[in-house]
Amino acid sequence: MSLEALTLSPATHAQGTVQLPGSKSISNRALLLAAITSGTTTLTGVLDSDDTRVMLESLHKMGVSAQKVAETTYRIQGGVPFSPSRADLFLGNAGTAVRSLTAALALMGGEFTLSGIPRMHERPIGDLVDALRAAGAQIDYLGNDGYPPLRIRSPQLNISQPIRVKGSVSSQFLTALLMAAPIATQQCQQDLVIEVEGTLISQPYIAITLDMMARFGVQVEHDANWQRFVVSKSARYQSPETLHVEGDASSASYFLALGTIAGGPIRIEGVGALSVQGDVQFANVMQQMGAEVQFEPNAMVVRGKKVAAGEKLRAFDMDFNLIPDAAMTAAAIAIYADGPCTLRNIASWRVKETDRIDAMQNELRQIGAQVESGPDWLRVYPIAPEQWRSARIHTYDDHRMAMCLSLAVFGGVPQTILDPNCVSKTFPHYFSVFNELVQ
Ligand SMILES: O=C(O)C1=C[C@@H](OP(=O)(O)O)[C@@H](O)[C@H](O)C1
Ligand SMILES: C=C(OP(=O)(O)O)C(=O)O
């Protein structure tokens, strides 16, 4: 059943406990790594959402057995090359699936097409394709140059020279090359050197990639500046046998923010001080805005202000390059601050599920905020009590627009979220969890 609009009543307080769904970034990395690793791997805590579903469906099409053995547990029988080695894959709008499968399949050999929803065909992949072509991959653009859909044919691998990849548009290109590299080093019996050209954005996601590869037995050497990575010719993925996927730190941001603006306490289970995800740093942003956060190894407890009673959060002016996804949550609750809040270095927002800088500006304006923006920045002014407006909030088929703008219900007026089911990309049950916490 598709629900076209969800009206949320004005609220004053939120408290309770949340069990987070599994991390999207870790789930899709773990699924792919288990699929290209010989033997059986059991993954627990796997996210069940659109982005992981398209990954699983694609693996099934390529003959990988990924059996669901319990609610969030999959048993995967892996090994390369895949058989059948021909398939047409539909990957929705899952950046983590399109980019990582492109690299793995382009180095593995076979005939594949990769496509997605129309927005996916507007999300860049040219820097990754250029890097793979330099290593001998055969990739054609089936639509516009630089964008999916793609056709992949068997490569003539040559990795004797370092492969250079730009890091300024998406870190997922480097992630994709790193995870696929052992396929090429094994075939060529040579080390593979990857050099990042220019700036690398979203760097904590590379830390997740290296951590996951290490859990599958491959240690990648890199320099202190994260510009040069070496995957050894002796690198071989080995199944960790079982691997637990921790909770999603970007999904945690909505509840960290909720505790910050609506009192709490809110206990968030699934990620904490031991997390490998950069987005867990969003808890520090909430502390800077006035929340108290207690960290446990795998949980966080947040207590904060009561913005509905007139309390204010501390305004910020920050660089959000390291946590682009959780940054959206900070933009949404800037409306409750004691001054204008500036988010800097967020150019990547423009090439994600939608142009998130424009989308955020449009929708925050609808509810009464003054907003300014530039190519890579956004400034949000707090909404004064008399300026609040009830709005029909557009979500642009962007799960994060729907989730972070649900936090706009503490201004004394109801808000309607259009197409709320777009949260299914990463958090299908978001609104029922949200409604349990909010009064
Ligand atoms: O590697 C990953 O799992 C991700 C990297 C980030 O993308 P960019 O590197 O394009 O910023 C992030 O926004 C995305 O949701 C997930
Ligand atoms: C940018 C995102 O997704 P993707 O993995 O499709 O890049 C996101 O989840 O915010």
Image (cartoon, rainbow, N blue to C red):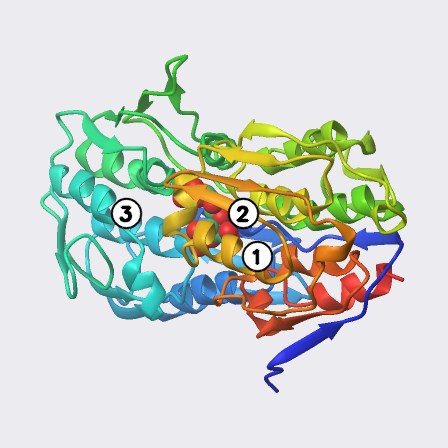
Q: Residue furthest top?
A: 224
**Given the current orientation, which residue lies at the most extreme front position?**
386
Q: Amino acid at mark 2?
A: Val
Q: How many other residues sit within 10 Å of disc 2, few (<14), some (14-19) or many (≥20)?
A: many
Quarter where residue 112 is shown: bottom left
**Which of the labelled discs sits on residue 371, or is there none?**
2
| Left or right side of 338 for 325 | left
- Dot 2 falls on a residue whose secondary structure is strand
**Which label's residue is closer to the chain start, 1 or 2?**
1
Q: Is mark 3 within 8 Å of ligand 1?
A: no
| Residue 73 vs residue 17, the one in the foreground | 17
Residue in view at x 64 percent, y 31 percent: 281
Q: Is residue 40 visible?
A: no
250 relative to 208, above or below: below
Q: Earlier in the sequence, mark 3 or mark 1?
A: 3
User: Does residue 314 sit above or below 114 in this rendering?
Assistant: above
Query: Is 61 above or below relative to 332?
Result: below
Give whichever of discs 3 and 2 has the lower sequence position.
3
Q: Which of the two marks, 3 or 2, is nearer to us in this view?
A: 2
Q: Quadrant of the C terminus?
A: bottom right
Q: Secondary structure at mark 1?
A: helix
Separation of marks 3 and 1 at Cα, in angstroms: 40 Å
Amino acid type, callout 1: Arg
Q: Which residue position is annotated with label 3? A: 103
Viewer-closest of 201 and 416 = 416
Residues marked 1 and 2 touching at CB (< 8 Å): yes
